[in-house]
Image (tube, grey):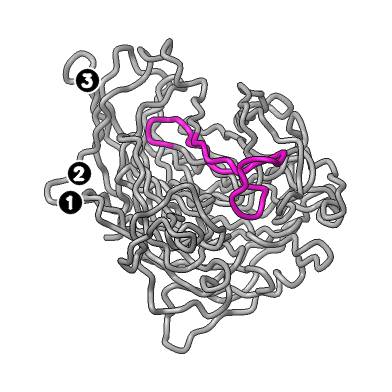
Amino acid sequence: MHMQLTHHNTIVVFDQTGSDRSRYKLRHRYNGTRCKGTHDDMADSSCYAHSVEYSISANQIRPLNLETDAWCSSGSMLSNGTLLQTGGFGDGYRRIRYYEPCENRNCDWRQSRTLLSSDRWYSSNLLLPENDRVIVVGGRAEFTYEFIPKSSGGEKSFDLPFLYDTYDRNERGNNLYPFLHLSSDGNLFIFANRDSILFNYKLNEVVKNFPQIPGNGSRSYPSTGSSVILPLDHSNGFQKVEVMVCGGSASGAYTAAINGRFLDGLRSCGRMVISGDKHQWTMENMPRPRLMTDMLILPTGNILMINGVERGCAGWNNAENPSLEPYLYRPRKTLGSRFSTLRSTKIARMYHSSAILLPDGRVLVAGSNPQYGYVTEGVRYPTELRLQAFVPPYMDEQFDQRRARNLSVLYANGDYGVKYGEEFVVHFNLDKKLSNVKFTAYMPPFNTHSISMNQRMLVLRCKSVSRPIEGLFYATLEAPPSANVAPAGYYLITVVNAGFPSVSQWVRFMHA
């Protein structure tokens, strides 16, 4: 399952095209021929949808045409809100696809004639500071990276020895879907297996080799831990950059799983500041072992850990003991008091599950398919077709009076976004006085396989707040200083008052 929130408040959802028949039958194939009730048509996967657009407000879906297999692929949102989607399986190995969301609901996938230079299956994707340039890193048996678009017609993939060094041949890789984070100095943090580097992609050179994360086991697919870059803050000029890596599988988990033994996952999380000159992992434990977990940055700056399992590794029927209880992690609390356990779900969300943050503060949870194809009965962990909305504690109605309402973003006359370093104004209603108010900007991620690519949160500088009439506030905010801090594109801006977030609205940060 792959998901991406768009600035039209819709969600693009897609699965593999080769997974046989979905539960969404089409009247016509995308080539226009009719899907009849014949035995052949009923068995033809092209008579079923494998991608949909979900409208949050209407609670409706419509089918989309995905021409090639995007199974286990990657993606990034470009500055105009278009989803750039890369790679996949089989006929999708080298494909580049675009989805430009629209208001009239007539938009659909567009497949580029340009191909990737290398096969990209289980690769990662990151939007770079240069306007609408994306890097694609790794993949199954691919120890390279490449750019979209290329800087010249003859440009191909570039070798990345770090991927050779972290490859575990006996455990199906353990360095697939590497974690990528953009540091505010413009370099890339790349984590695979248990190791990490700071990489200058412009010069194709490693700037730093960071200490190996402590403990045994692996953190990368199929061991499948998770990672976030903690919120960047204007108070230090967005220069303190700290990453967090949580969970994963024990050593030998893949080999054990294919032989029917499921080893306990890892409990540990590590945090490390990657800016400056001193780098050391600070370790702490989750309440229980966990892997295949989605880590989402909530508007409060806290981290939600949701979905996953306690034993095994990623892959078909390679895990058991679903993690039904989400965890809330408060990064600003003292070590040892940061984790709390939230209300449990009754639905197992295991391999191929996804989660994304919605503008109203809820979290959409979807998927789970430990089986090959769609298997909805007769197995312990069936294909899960239900959507859920997880409602964080901050949304309880008892806090409504402390929550800002009717948030709006005001651009200067004629502008359709905010240029780096410029001021812009937001206004909102609030019944109570402001209390420890902060303004956050969040780049929604492309989510798949417990990886939230491009997820990023900024705490913006507020230069002034006025209250022209009772209950109405105007706040003058300052946009991020550069694309190194916030790559150009659409972000969700939120007023967080006394720890309670408003409904978010979209703001576009852009180059001059």
Label whose residue precedes the other's in the sequence (1 or 3):
1
Badge 3 crowding class, 10 Å Cα cut-off, few under 14, some 14 to 19, many 20 or more, is some
The image's mark for residue 415 is 1
Residue at the limit of the structure toward the bottom, as seen here? 154
- Front residue of 303/122: it is 122
Q: Which residue is mark 3?
A: 472
Q: Judge left or right: residue 421 versus residue 385.
A: left
Q: Judge left or right: residue 32 versus residue 215.
A: left
Which amino acid is tagged 2?
Tyr
Magenta stretch, residue numbers: 358-387
Residue appearing at x 25%, y 55% in the figure: 106
Q: Position of residue 151 (x, y in %)?
A: 42, 80
Element assignment for label 1: loop
Magenta: main secondary structure equals loop
Which amino acid is tagged 1?
Asp
Q: Which residue is mark 2?
A: 411
Which amino acid is tagged 3?
Leu
CB under 8 Å between callouts 3 and 2? no
Q: CA separation, marks 1 and 3? A: 24 Å
- The vertical placement of 118 against 393, above or below, is below
